[in-house]
Image (spheres, coloured by chain):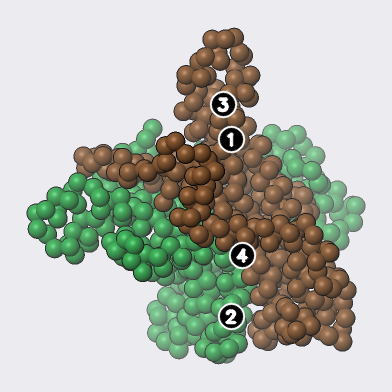
Amino acid sequence: MLRQIGKRFALAIPSVIGVIIVTFLLTRVLPGDTAAYFAGPAATAQAIEEIRASLGLDKPLPEQFLRYIKDLSTGNFGTSLTTGQPVLRDIAERLPASAELTLLGLLISILIAVPLGIIAAVRQGSLIDHACRIVATAGVSLPVFFTGLILVYVFYFRLGWSPAPLGRLDIFYSAPPHVTGFYLIDSLIAGEFETFRAALAQLILPAATLAIFSLAPITRMTRASMLAVLSSDFVRTARASGLSPRSVIVTYAFRNAMLPVITTLGMVFSFLLGANVLVEKVFAWPGIGSYAIEALVASDFAPVQGFVLTMAILYVLLNLMIDMLYGVIDPRVRLEG
Amino acid sequence: MNQRPALETAHIAATEMAAAAGAVPPDAIIPVSAPKQTSLLAHARYVIAENPVTGIAFGLFVLIAVCAIFGPWIAPYDPLASNTTSALQPPSAEHWFGTDQLGRDILSRVIVAARLDMAIAVSSVALVFALGGLSGTAAGFFGGWTDRIIGRIADTIMAFPLFVLAMGIVAALGNTVTNIVIATAIINFPLYARVARAEANVRRDAGFVQAARLSGNGEYRILLTQILPNIMPIMVVQMSLTMGYAILNAAGLSFIGLGVRPPTPEWGIMVAEGAGFIISGEWWIAFFPGAALMLAVFCFNLLGDGLRDIVDPQRRT
C-alpha cells in the first residue's frame, strides 16, 4: 500500500512541473511588460526598472526560471500591492474560508445527488427519473452566479430567512479562536454555539449555490453507473439467490456503482474550484477567489499568479487523493505505469 | 498521470468492472435500434419526434440567432441611452424588462448583447475546433512523439481548474475580449484534442486509409482528405456540446470584471451590474440578462444532445 502511494505521488510530479512551467510562462513570456504588471498601474519608469532588476527580469529566461523555482520553494510568491502583505500569507489566511465553502457545497451536493441518481436508476422511467433528467440538464445550464443571486433575492430579500450576503460572519459576532480556520469547526471546539449558528447561516446560501451547480454531473454519473451495474451478472445472481431488493441495491450494486462516481469527482472539483470564485464574488466571501478578483481588477499580478498556482496545486493534490481513494475502495485497481 | 477525461475513465472503469464480473460490456447490453436504411433526414425527424425538447431547443436557437443578427434593429430603445428620470423602474408595458440604475431599457440591452455573447462563444469554439481538432487528429493518426507532445500539453491544461486557468490567461495576456476568446479556446483544447485523437486513432489503419496509402497518397494528404472529413461529424457534435460551456465561461469571466467593459451590453457584465441591486429588491436588472444567459446555454446543451443522437446514436444516454 505504501509503495503504491509512493508510486502515485511520483506520477503527480509531471503535473506539478507542468503547472509550474505554465504559471511561469504566463508571467514571463507572454506579451506585456511583467515588471510593469508587478509594479502596478501607478508606477513610475524608475520604479519599473527597479522591479525589473529585483525580479531578475533582465536575466536570460532559463536563469529566471531557476530563480522562480527557488522563490517558490522558499514560499516566496511575491508581495501583494493592495494588501501590502506577502501573497503566500494572504492566501494562507483566506484559504480556509474557500475550503469550508467548497467542501460544504460538495457535501450537500453528494448527499442529494447520490440518492437521487440511485432512485432514478432503480425506478427507470418513473417520475423521479424524469426529475433527475431535468435536474441534470438544467443544472449544467445555470450560470452559478445567477443561481446565487436568485437565492439571495428569495431567501434574503423576499423571505428574510438568511442574513445579508456579506462575508463569513455577521458583524455582531467575532470570529471563533483559530484552530482549523473553519468557522463551523472552530466555533464548536470553542463551544460557542451562537457563533456556530451565525456562521452556518452565512454559509448555507453560498454552499447551496455550489451544491446546485455540482448536482448535475454527480446525479448523471450515479444514475449511469448504477444502471450499468444493475444490469450486470452479479446483480442478477444476487437477485436470483433471493436477496432482498434492498440488500441487492445497497450492498452489491451501490458499492460497485460508486467507483465511476468517485472518478467524476475529479472533474466536479475542477468546475467547483472555478465556480467558487464566482460564488465568492456574489456573496462577498473573504476567500482566495475574491482575493484574486480584487487583485485582477487592480492589475496586481503577483496575487493572481499565486492564486492560479495554489489552485492548480490543490487540484493536482485533490486528484491524487481521489485516485488513492479509488485504490482503497477497489483493490482490483492496479496502478498503470 | 492519469488525466483522462473523467467520463471516459468512468466508462472504462465501468467496462473493466463489468468484464471483471464476467458481464458483457455495457455497449452490448443496450440494444442499439439504429435505423438501418433510412436517410439522415428521416433519422433526424425520428430523433426530434422522439424528443420534442430538441425541437423547442431549435426554436430557441432561431430566436437567439435572430437577436444576434438583427438585435440593434429589433431593440425597442437605444441600449446605451441613459435616462435618469426613468431609472430603476420595474417591468412594465413600456419597459418589458424594466430599466437599470441609469434608466437604460433592459430588454434592449439583453437583445443587443446576444450578438457579443454569441460572437465570443462562436469564435472561441471555432478557434479550438481548428486547433484542437487538427492537433488531436495528427496525434491519433501519427502516434509516437506527436501524440506524446500533444497529450502532454492537454494533460498540463487539465491539471488546472479550467476557469482558474482562464482567469490567469486573461490576466497575463491583457484584459480584452479577444483574450477571453483565446482563454476559452485554450481551456477547451484538451476536450477537442482527445475526441479527435480517439476518432483518428481508430481510423488510422482502416481499409479506406490503406487504400489511399496504396494508391500513393502521402501521409499528410491522407490526414487531410481521408481522416479529417470522416471525423468531422463527431467534431461538430463536440462543438455544439461545448458551445454552452463556452458561453458560461465567457460570461463568468466578464461577471468578475474581465474582458467586456461597461457600458457595453453583455449578459455576464449586466448580471454583475445588477448584482448590487438584488439585496435592495431590484431583481429585474440582474434577472433578465441572467435568464437570457441560462436559456442560451440550455438551448445549446439540448441542441448538442439532439445533434449527438442524430450523428452518433450509440452514445445516447
Give the CA distance from mark 1 to mark 3. Answer: 9 Å
Q: Amino acid at mark 3?
A: Ile
How many labels were placed on the picture?
Answer: 4
Q: Position of residue B98 (x, y in %)?
A: 75, 81
Which residue corresponds to mark 3?
A: B227
Q: Nearer the viewer, residue B35 or B302?
A: B35
**Helix, strand or loop status at disc 2:** helix
Q: For the residues tagged 3 and 2, is the chain the same? A: no
Quarter of the image for residue A281 reads bottom right
Tag 1 near tag 2, CB within 8 Å: no
Classed neighbour count for the residue bearing mark 4: other residues with Cα under 10 Å, few (<14), some (14–19), many (≥20) = many
Any part of residue A13 in sight: no
Mark nearest the camera among 3 and 2 is 3
Which chain contains the residue that carries disc 2? A
Which chain contains the residue that carries disc 4? B
Colour brown belongs to chain: B
Colour green belongs to chain: A
Q: Position of residue B20 (x, y in %)?
A: 24, 40
Relative to A173, is A231 above or below?
Answer: above
Q: Which mark is residue A152?
A: 2
The disc, 4 or 1, on the residue closer to the chain's N-terminal end is 1
Give the CA distance from mark 3 to mark 2. Answer: 51 Å
